[in-house]
Amino acid sequence: MSDTPNEHLAGILSDFEGTAAGLETDSFTSMEDREEEDAGIMTENIKEESKADQSLQEDRLEAHAKTEENESKEEAEQVEADLKVQLCEPFPGLQTGLIRSADLFGYVGIESVLDQMRRKTVKAGFEFNIMVVGQSGLGKSTLVNTLFKSKVSRKSSTPNYEEKISKTVRLHAVSHVIEEKGVKMKLTVIDTPGFGDQINNQNCWEPIVKYVNEQYEKYLREELNVNRKRRIPDSRVHCCIYFLPASGHSLRPIDVEFMKRLGKIVNIVPVIAKADTLTVEERQEFKERIRQDLEANGIHVYPQRELDEDPEDRILNDRIRASIPFAVVGTDKEHQVNGHKVLGRKTKWGIIEVENVAHCEFANLRDLLIRSHLQDLKDVAHNVHYETYRVRRLNESNMNLSELVLSSWPLQNKMDKCETESHL
Amino acid sequence: TMASSDVARQPDKGARPLSLAGHVGFDSLPDQLVNKSICQGFCFNILCIGETGIGKSTLMDTLFNTNFENFESSHFEPQVKLRAQTYDLQETNVRLRLTVVNTVGFGDQMNKQDSYQPVVDYIDKQFESYLQEELKIKRSLHNYHDSRVHACLYFISPSGHSLKSLDLVTMKKLDSKVNIIPVIAKADTISKSELHKFKIKIMSELVSNGVQIYQFPLDDETVAKVNTTMNGHLPFAVVGSTEEVCVGNKMVKARQYPWGVVQVENEQHCDFVKLREMLICVNMEDLREQTHSRHYELYRRCKLEEMGFKDTDPECKPVSLQQTYEAKRQEFLLELQRREDEMRQIFVQRVKEKEAELKEAERELQSRFEQLKRRHAEEKATLEEKKRLFEEDQSSFNKRKAATQLLQAQNMTANGKKDKDRKK
């Protein structure tokens, strides 16, 4: 017998949880349903009064009573067939029924919003955080410096004996502000010296995973503050370039392990470093094997297939996916070739022109990373990876904040109602 | 381990500016961003507050060069209501989802004390809806249809004298929730000199009552000049019309009177062009940004503080949201526990009462049983007595019978003997 009050409460709680779960799919309906329940008696009274008095006004009053949209729909239909106005409670899902498309009879100036947006974003400036991961000596710093045509990354000095034997991967973030044609960007390069350099590289990705998650955590905390900054400082890793040595064979275990783990939490762009040791044919074969390895191990690199939004996107991204990983060569030295100054590596057998697509794929990488997909990298980091982290964190700490926000007022009502309905 | 606060300090440590050795290509970033926005489309929501018949709908039609579905409202609405309609507009490649919200019945009631309330409620509801989405665990903010009010056009009656108290009260209630742009409606009923005095009176009344209207922003040099000028022309005196009149050799939007033609787009006649310029062509993006970063943040902050969330505890040490949440959750669970105990007590009480009832019934039954038993015993005793008497009777009867028989037998033998004796 003593179970009954518990059962009853469990019933209330499960109702509440059910509503909270319902929040995930259709928050507004639940809240409005609750309002309706509470306002139920009131609206019934109103209906009765209006039925007594048949005037149009009363019907319209009823139609626009601030309760459910459905109710007003019914009444409006009954009373005024030609009026299609509803009290708009805009929210996703129900919106589609209410939107009409209207034709403009002349120029309004709406398209100037593009310019306004451009002005504002340029004024605010941009941030970009790029991480480079790979064994030492693969030319990470050189590549980043070549990409951004400036010394944004310091080449790490050769570690001495003690450092080589020490067992940690150190992370090192350096920020610079660079400007081009009025566009200011704060570029942060996160270097990972020590990765893959130890004798035992077990778990060498852990400090990196930790760093990536820490940045998400920092952002999340700021976002959850009551008093928060207008612009939340963004230190989240937008892009992680993973350097594969040009072995010409296939992915090594360390490559697979790293990319598997990091691919889930950050945008990974794998590149074949120091690709001037591969002939064009060797390069193609190597790339193909790598692509197969990636697929076989379920590794999702950027641009991720599941994020393609529409067929157009898919076609574009398929093309990119068919050419990664880019085989790159980096340098900061310039040489004279055919009367032009070019960035290149001079060897006894010729000059490797870095920006020549016939020689290596540096230009492709640069175009993808910077000229066309930089904003997209940030967007994916924000809308996908960060959100995934957020969901996990909020679930972990059992924090359903929206539930709590809602709970502050309707819970009282629901509890009281249940008490009066009990048949004890 | 790197505490998140440590990492926070690094990027803020003045990133050094660096010059580029050549063209990198991130100057395309604003374009990348703008292109993404074009794909997504824009949202803009305008709230029009004004008395019935003041020209809200006409002005919207004129501003957006289109024919929105309009309804004439009666003057007999018992309460102020809001009517929202959403439209999909397109100009070149820009898609705008415009929501126009009109007050219905504003200023018509005898008692206008609470007229502002439905408007405040509507605005708050849109903020609430956004907040709910933002606090969800699985949320989809970049897909969310933003229904928050970006601009509020307050229509002032062209009395030529001063603001009505309803105007002041309403605007005061709204100035911290929405960007207010006051306009003088039907400005073709005021003469130029009267208009000048009217504008000055209105602005001074606003200032002396502490009403914060929207100021066109001056922080961007590109538009600072024009915005400063326009700020000086507030409130805009507007005339709306979708009808066209032939003036010279052009068809222009105008209102035809016997004494002349008021041209809507003639800056000598009214400020319509200024309004369109400011509202749409120059500051639409700023209106959206202010709504999000100022008005919404204020709402969010107040709401969270109301619920007891703080960023720092009484000793000004930072409180993680998790701690506050846990505390609230404890509170909530305690309340639940209290209710449960209450319910259990009530239940136990009822059970006791029921038990008492049953006991009472049992006792009654028992006593009746006893009664019956007693009666039964009595009757049995009586019957036993009767039986005994009867048996006594029977035995005495038998005795007498036996005695009689004996006597008879004796008599017979005596008689026989006598007979025998006589014969002898």
Image: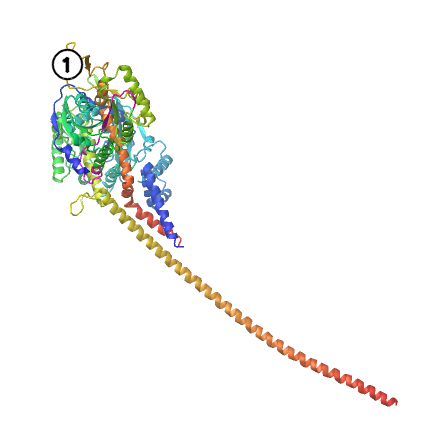
- Please identify the quarter of the rendering in which residue B87 is found: top left
| Main SS, magenta residues | loop
Say if residue B259 shows up in the picture.
no
Query: x%, y% of residue B416?
Result: 83, 86
Q: Amino acid at mark 1?
A: His
In front: A91, or B201?
A: A91
Say if residue A295 shows up in the picture.
yes
Q: Is residue A280 magenta?
A: no
In front: B164, or B300?
A: B300
Q: Is residue A244 magenta?
A: yes
Q: What residue is shown with label 1?
A: A335
Query: x%, y% of residue A231?
Result: 18, 33
Count of numbered circles on the image: 1
Q: Of all residues shown, which one is farthest toward the front?
A: A161
In front: A12, or A214?
A: A214
Q: Is residue B18 above or below residue B153?
A: above
Query: x%, y% of residue B357?
Result: 43, 62
Q: Of all residues shown, which one is farthest toward the top?
A: A338
Query: x%, y% of residue B8?
Result: 17, 35
Residue at 33% x, 45% y is A38
SS at circle 1: strand
Part of the protein shown in magenta = A221-250
Q: Is residue A389 above or below residue A49?
A: above
Here the colouring is rainbow
